[in-house]
Amino acid sequence: MNKLKMKKFYGPFAMLGAAILLAIVGMVASTIRDNMSGLETPMFTERRLIETEEHGLLSVRYIEFMNDELPNRFGFSYEELRTANWLVEELAAIGFSQDLITVQAFSRADAIAAMLHYGPELVFGLALTQIGTNSPFYEAGLRADEMSQNIILTIPGISDEVIVVGAHYDSVMFPSASDNASGVALLLESASRMLEVDNYYTIQYVFFGAEEVGLAGVYYYIASLSHAEHENIVAMINADILLEGDGLFLGAGYYAGGEIGANPVTSVFNLLSINPAQNQITQTWDDLAVMLSDSHDDLDFISDPYVTLATSDHIAFLHYGHTVVVFVGMDMIDGWYDLGRGITSPTSGMIPLLHSSRDDFHYINENFPGRMERNMRGFSLLLEEMLLVNYE
């Protein structure tokens, strides 16, 4: 593993570009605030220096804050918009200049078009067509303009090659601590820790909107990239549902165009015409997980490419050909990944909190004490290692 400690260089052209981008971002952010229609944005007051703080503790505070102050973040709703505005303000409060923060707004129609054009599983997009004034969620605050947005933080590196780190910030109509305040919290803590780090790769943190209604935000993001920008992506790291259980799962792979990859579950992927293969990057991720498991008695990472089948934002990158990894916290079930025993549909046993009132910070803390701190510490440590490695 090679951790690089190099200084960033910001030349006059970069400064000029930043000034132009600042003006653009300022206009977009102003538009979002104008659309807030007087909605009040809560303030996170538990931010503090974390250089000497144990990994994961800041994430836990963020989860509790979003759980209590920003619940019911349904896609295309005013609550989702309020959360987006908070993310922009929080990233600025952490210490990032406005020129590094982009608000990528999109309409429901834009998302449907991107989904139908780029989405291999059209069924994911069906939920989008049902959102409108007749939706049962309209009374819960669906926006009249049917808009959503991705929030993007770009931290320049020595290289202009990009590692995308993603998590969706929308939710179903519950506090949704695990799905997916946990992923958002992980990204916010990671960004806080990377603020003063000399990173080799450019890191782009993307907080995706409208995931629960059909992966709308990620497919709009994918559609917005040029061919050159796609070629510039090294890998995509996705964090979603980190508190369902005590198992620290990571599923890594890339779509090899039908070629069978080196993994134990190719028969399942063949059924779905998806064959995530392994490469140098996924092997490095596995090695990092093993290293952390060996050096921390309470951490036991479980690497299984089957997890890449989880329906989340990494799917869009996987089908486009990018190397991906998804973090998921869930309980292990005997034989869950043992296809020889015919267990291929374990959903009911491994997601006891998902999309229910039990997906609540206080319920999880009371019924599963210590899980939140342990899981967030483990995933925070692993993400940091992944971002500091030189994959060349």
Image: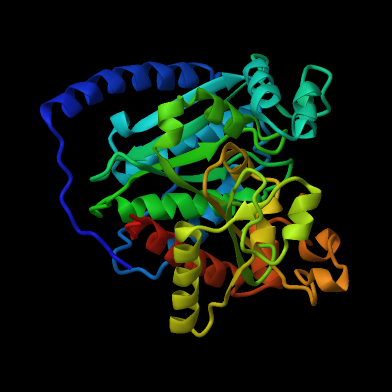
Q: In what quadrant of the picture does the C terminus appear?
A: bottom left
Q: Residue at x 71, y 56 (%)?
A: 359
Residue at the location (78% across, 59% down)?
A: 267
Q: State the scheme by which the image is colored.
A: rainbow
Outermost residue toward the front in this view: 259
- Residue furthest to the left: 12
Q: In this view, does 162 lie above or below 63?
A: above
Q: Position of residue 145 (x, y in %)?
A: 64, 14
At horizontal 42% and vertical 18% (from top left) the residue drawn is 28
Residue 370: percent from left, percent from top: 59, 75
Q: Is residue 349 above or below residue 123?
A: below
Is 368 displayed left or right of 161 in the figure?
right
How far across and down, in percent of the image, does residue 71 sit?
64, 43
* Relative depth, front residue between 340 and 166: 340
Query: Looking at this view, is 310 or 138 the one in front?
Result: 310
Query: Which image quadrant is residue 369 in?
Result: bottom right
Q: Is residue 139 visible?
A: yes
Q: Nearer the viewer, residue 258 or 248?
A: 258
Name the quarter where the N terminus is drawn: bottom left
Task: Say if 376 sits above or below 20 in the image.
Answer: below
- Residue 149 appears in the rendering: no
For image coordinates 46% across by 38% down, the residue present is 87
- How many numbered circles are shown? 0
Left or right of 18 in this view: 315 = right
Q: Is residue 38 left or right of residue 8?
A: right
* Image quadrant where residue 158 sits: top left
Which residue extends farthest bottom?
A: 297
